[in-house]
Image: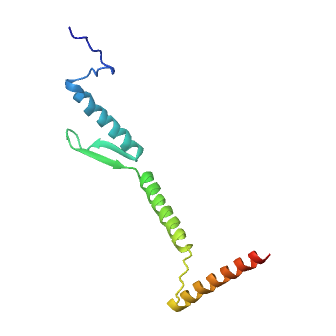
Amino acid sequence: MRPTRTPDLPLHKGGQNGRKNLGSSLNNALEKGLDLAGLSKTKTGSGDKERAYIVRQNGVLKFLLFIIAFCTLAMVGVFSTYLEINISRRQAIHSEALHRKLEHSAQLKLMSVH
């Protein structure tokens, strides 16, 4: 005899495999998102099934203000960046490394004396 297995998660009780409810919830989420973005949905005329979207001027102006502020901040960041470029010859680099090595060895000798 097999033991009966109880599901750990509750079963979804919707339409056929839950597909019917999924479409309506996506439409509701889309409408809420459009409303937050400053768009409202309407029909184009009486009896027409085509949908039209009305854009609020306030939303467009806020979006343009955001883009201008972002570009301004980006330009301030780029223009306030300080880059230092040093051009030196290979011989100067080698002589500096040799000088550093000699200074280090001299300091070690001085420390061993005291």
Quick check: can you spot residue 44? no
Q: Nearer the viewer, residue 57 or 15?
A: 15
The residue depicted at 25 percent of the width and 33 percent of the height is 23
- Image quadrant assignment for residue 76: bottom right
Asked whether 23 or 61 is in front, the reply is 23
Number of numbered discs:
0
Depth check, front residue: 59 or 109:
109
| Image vertical order of residue 59 relative to residue 76, above or below | above
**Is residue 93 visible in this depiction of the protein?**
yes
Which image quarter holds the N terminus? top left
Residue ID at (45%, 52%): 58
The outermost residue toward the right is: 114
- At 27% from the left and 15% from the top, the residue drawn is 5
Q: Report x, y in % for residue 97.
A: 58, 84
Q: Is 83 in front, or is 104?
A: 104
Q: Is residue 64 left or right of residue 91?
A: left
Residue 107: give x, y in percent of width and height.
Answer: 71, 79
Residue 87 shown left or right of residue 13 in the figure: right
* Image: 10 above or below 67: above
| 77 is higher (above) or lower (below) than 36 | below
- Farthest top residue? 1
Residue 92: image location, x then y, percent = 55, 90
